[in-house]
Image: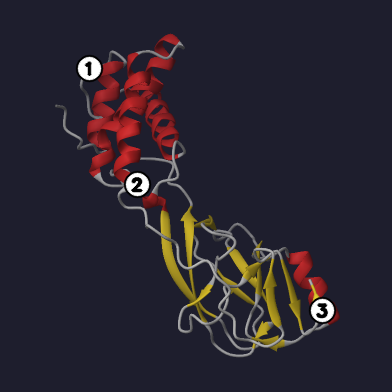
C-alpha cells in the first residue's frame, strides 16, 4: 500500500511526474512547469480542505473580558464560531448560561433602551474598525451588558484555512493519516488540467476522502456539553431554545 506521508517535496514531484515533467523537485522545474504544478497543488489542497468540516480546523480558546470595555478582539486565525447557540461559555462558573449570540444592531438597540454594565449575556460578531492594510483585519465580539469585571469565557472556533503548501510551509494541516487523500485530490486537479475531465484520480480522491472522514470522526467530541439553561440570575429567562430572552422584564 502506498505511504500516507506527503509534504511539499513529495506532492510537487508526484504532480510533476503526472503532468509529464518527470519526478522533479521544485527547483528543477521551469517557471512554466512550476506554475502548472502549483495550480494543481493549490486546487487539490483547497478542495480537500473544504470537502469536510475537519476537526483539525477547529480550535478551543478562552478570552477574558475587561471591565467597562464593550469588545474583545478574537484571534487572527478566527473564521467563525463552531456553535453559535452556545458560542461563549463561562469557564469558571458553569451555573451561568452561555452568551446568547445576536446581531450588532440588536445590541445597539438594547443599549439605547438600557445601557448598563454587568455580566455579558449577549454577544455579536463584527469586523474590528480601523483597518488600514498594515495588519490583518480581525473579528471582535461586542458584549451586552458591557462587562463590569473580568469574566473568562471559553469558545470553539473554525480557523482561517491555509491556502498553500510551499517550501516555507511544507506540511499540510492535519496529520499524515490524510496524506494520500490530499495527494489524490492534487492528482485529480492535474487530470482536469490535462484532459478537462474527472478520471481515475478523482474517483480515488473520493474513496480516500471517505476513509479520511471516518478517521477524523474518531477525534470528534461525543458531546459539546449539556444543552440546558443553568442560569440562576433573577431577571434572565431563556425560552424557545435561546431565541428570545427577557432582561429585567423587557422581552428581546
3D distance between C-alphas at marks 1 and 2 = 37 Å
What residue sits right under mark 1 in the picture? 22
Which quadrant, please, contains the C terminus? bottom right
Residue 28: x percent and y percent? 24, 26
Residue 133: x percent and y percent? 60, 57
Q: Is 138 rendered above or below residue 188?
A: below
Q: Residue 250 carries which label?
A: 3
Q: Is 55 rendered above or below residue 187?
A: below
Find the residue positioned furthest to the left. Answer: 1
Q: Is mark 2 on a helix, strand or loop?
A: helix
Q: Earlier in the sequence, mark 3 or mark 2?
A: 2
Q: How crowded is mark 1: few (under 14 residues within 10 Å), some or many (20 or more)?
A: some
Which of 222 and 22 lies nearest the eye of the viewer? 222
What residue sits right under mark 2 in the picture? 217
Q: Is 18 rendered above or below residue 172?
A: above
- Whether pointer 3 and pointer 1 mark residues with C-beta atoms closer than 8 Å, the reply is no
3D distance between C-alphas at marks 3 and 2 = 43 Å
Amino acid at each position: 500500500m502506498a505511504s500516507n506521508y506527503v509534504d511539499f517535496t513529495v506532492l510537487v514531484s508526484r504532480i510533476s511526474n503526472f503532468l509529464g515533467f518527470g519526478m522533479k523537485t521544485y527547483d528543477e522545474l521551469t517557471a512554466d512547469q512550476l506554475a502548472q504544478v502549483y495550480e494543481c497543488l493549490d486546487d487539490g489542497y483547497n478542495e480537500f480542505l473544504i470537502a469536510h468540516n475537519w476537526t483539525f480546523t477547529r480550535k478551543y480558546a478562552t478570552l477574558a473580558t475587561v471591565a467597562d470595555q464593550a469588545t474583545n478582539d478574537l484571534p487572527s486565525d478566527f473564521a467563525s464560531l463552531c456553535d453559535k447557540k452556545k458560542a461563549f461559555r463561562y469557564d469558571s462558573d458553569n451555573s451561568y448560561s452561555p452568551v446568547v449570540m445576536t446581531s450588532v444592531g440588536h445590541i445597539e438597540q438594547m443599549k439605547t433602551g438600557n445601557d448598563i454594565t454587568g455580566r455579558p449575556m449577549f454577544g455579536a460578531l463584527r469586523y474590528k474598525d480601523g483597518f488600514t492594510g498594515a495588519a490583518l483585519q480581525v473579528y471582535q465580539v461586542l458584549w451586552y451588558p458591557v462587562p463590569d469585571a473580568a469574566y473568562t469565557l471559553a469558545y470553539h472556533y473554525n480557523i482561517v484555512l491555509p491556502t498553500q503548501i510551499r517550501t516555507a510551509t511544507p506540511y499540510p494541516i492535519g496529520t499524515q493519516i490524510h496524506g494520500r487523500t490530499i495527494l489524490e485530490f492534487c492528482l485529480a486537479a492535474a487530470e482536469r488540467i490535462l484532459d478537462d475531465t474527472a478520471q481515475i484520480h478523482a474517483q480515488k480522491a473520493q474513496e480516500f476522502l471517505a476513509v479520511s472522514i471516518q478517521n477524523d470522526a474518531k477525534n470528534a467530541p461525543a458531546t459539546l456539553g449539556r444543552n440546558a439553561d443553568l442560569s440562576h440570575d433573577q431577571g434572565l429567562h431563556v425560552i424557545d431554545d435561546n431565541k428570545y430572552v427577557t432582561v429585567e422584564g423587557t422581552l428581546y
